[in-house]
Image (tube, rainbow, N blue to C red):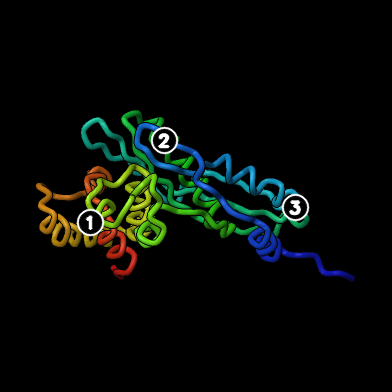
C-alpha cells in the first residue's frame, strides 16, 4: 500500500514546484515595482489543486485589533490565521498566525491594505517562493538596477521609495510582534541611534514610525535595515 502524502509533504512538493515571483507591477506615482496577491494566486492555485491543498484565511480574535491615528493617517494592526488543509484528509492541517498591518487616510482602506500585504507575503514566505527583491540594500548594491540607482552614491543619497519603507515597517512589526515592552525598546533605540545621528526632530512612536522611516535616504535605510535584522531585542 502506497502511503499518501501528509500536509507537510504536500507543502514541501509545492515549495519545490513554485518557481518565482517577479516584481513586474509598477506604481507610477511613487516609482517602484512590486508583486501582488493575484500573482501569488496565479502561481499557487494550480499547484494547490494538483496536490489537493485547500487554504483558509480569517481574522484571529485571540489578539486585539489595534488602531492608531496620526493626523489624518490611520494605522491598523491585527492578527490573521492562515490554515492549510489536506483535502484528502481534512483533519490534517497547518495553522499559521500572521500579523496584518496597514495604513491609509481612510480606515477601511487601511484594513484593505493590511489584508493585501498580509496575504501576498504569507503566500510568498509559506511556500518559499523566490522573488527578485529590490528592497534589500545588499541586493541593491550588488545589482544596481539603473531604473532605481545608477551608482552607490545615488543609492546612499536618494530618498527611499514607498515599497522600501513598507518592507522596513514590516520588519519592525516582525521584530516587535505584539510585545509592547519590546516595541518600546526598539523605538527608544531608534531614537537614541538614528534620530540623534540623522537629526530627526521629536520622539518616535508606533503611530509615526512608518512616516518617519519614509524620510530616510539609502544609507540610513541600509543601516536601519541591518540594525533591525541583526539586533536581538
Tag of residue 220:
1
**Alpha-carbon neighbours of circle 3 within 10 Å: few (<14), some, or many (≥20)?**
some
Quadrant the C terminus occupies: bottom left
Q: Nearer the viewer, residue 125 or 100?
A: 125
Query: Disc 3 vs disc 2: which is toward the camera?
Result: 2
The percent coordinates of residue 56 (x first, y second) are 61, 46
Image point 67% across, 54% down: which residue? 85
CA distance separating discs 1 and 3? 46 Å
Q: Nearer the viewer, residue 70 or 63?
A: 70
Taking 88 as reference, is 112 left or right? left
| Depicted 167 relative to depicted 211: above or below | below
Question: Mark 3 or mark 1, which is nearer the start of the sequence?
Answer: 3
Contact, mark 2 vs mark 1 (Cβ under 8 Å) = no
| Depicted 104 relative to depicted 16: above or below | above
Image point 34% across, 33% down: which residue? 104
> Label 1's element?
helix
Count of picture labels: 3
CA distance separating discs 2 and 1? 23 Å
Query: Disc 1 vs disc 3: which is toward the camera?
Result: 1
The percent coordinates of residue 51 (x first, y second) are 75, 55
Quadrant in the picture for residue 183: bottom left
Image point 27% across, 34% down: which residue? 73
> Label 2's element?
strand
Contact, mark 3 vs mark 2 (Cβ under 8 Å) = no
Q: Does residue 207 show up?
A: no
Q: Nearer the viewer, residue 81 or 4?
A: 4
Tag of residue 52:
3
The percent coordinates of residue 136 (x first, y second) are 38, 57
Question: Mark 1 or mark 2, which is nearer the start of the sequence?
Answer: 2
Q: Mark 2 sits on what residue?
A: 27
Amino acid at each position: 500500500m502506497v502511503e499518501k502524502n501528509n500536509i507537510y509533504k504536500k507543502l514541501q512538493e509545492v515549495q519545490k514546484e513554485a518557481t518565482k515571483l517577479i516584481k513586474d507591477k509598477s506604481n507610477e506615482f511613487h516609482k517602484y515595482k512590486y508583486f501582488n496577491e493575484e500573482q501569488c494566486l496565479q502561481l499557487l492555485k494550480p499547484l494547490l489543486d494538483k496536490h489537493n491543498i485547500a487554504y483558509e484565511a480569517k481574522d484571529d480574535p485571540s489578539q486585539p485589533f489595534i488602531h492608531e491615528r496620526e493626523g489624518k493617517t490611520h494605522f491598523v494592526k491585527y492578527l490573521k490565521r492562515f490554515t492549510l488543509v489536506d483535502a484528502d484528509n481534512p483533519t490534517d492541517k497547518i495553522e499559521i498566525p500572521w500579523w496584518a498591518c496597514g495604513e491609509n487616510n481612510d480606515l477601511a482602506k487601511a484594513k484593505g491594505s493590511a489584508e493585501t500585504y498580509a496575504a501576498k507575503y504569507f503566500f510568498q514566505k509559506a511556500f518559499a517562493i523566490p522573488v527578485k527583491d529590490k528592497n534589500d540594500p545588499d541586493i541593491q548594491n550588488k545589482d544596481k538596477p539603473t531604473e532605481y540607482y545608477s551608482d552607490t552614491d545615488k543609492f546612499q543619497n536618494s530618498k527611499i521609495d514607498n515599497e522600501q519603507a513598507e518592507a522596513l515597517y514590516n520588519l519592525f512589526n516582525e521584530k516587535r510582534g505584539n510585545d509592547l515592552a519590546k516595541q518600546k525598546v526598539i523605538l527608544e533605540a531608534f531614537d537614541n541611534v538614528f534620530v540623534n545621528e540623522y537629526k530627526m526632530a521629536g520622539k518616535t512612536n508606533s503611530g509615526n514610525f512608518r512616516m518617519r522611516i519614509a524620510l530616510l535616504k539609502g544609507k540610513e535605510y541600509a543601516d536601519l535595515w541591518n540594525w533591525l535584522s541583526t539586533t536581538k531585542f
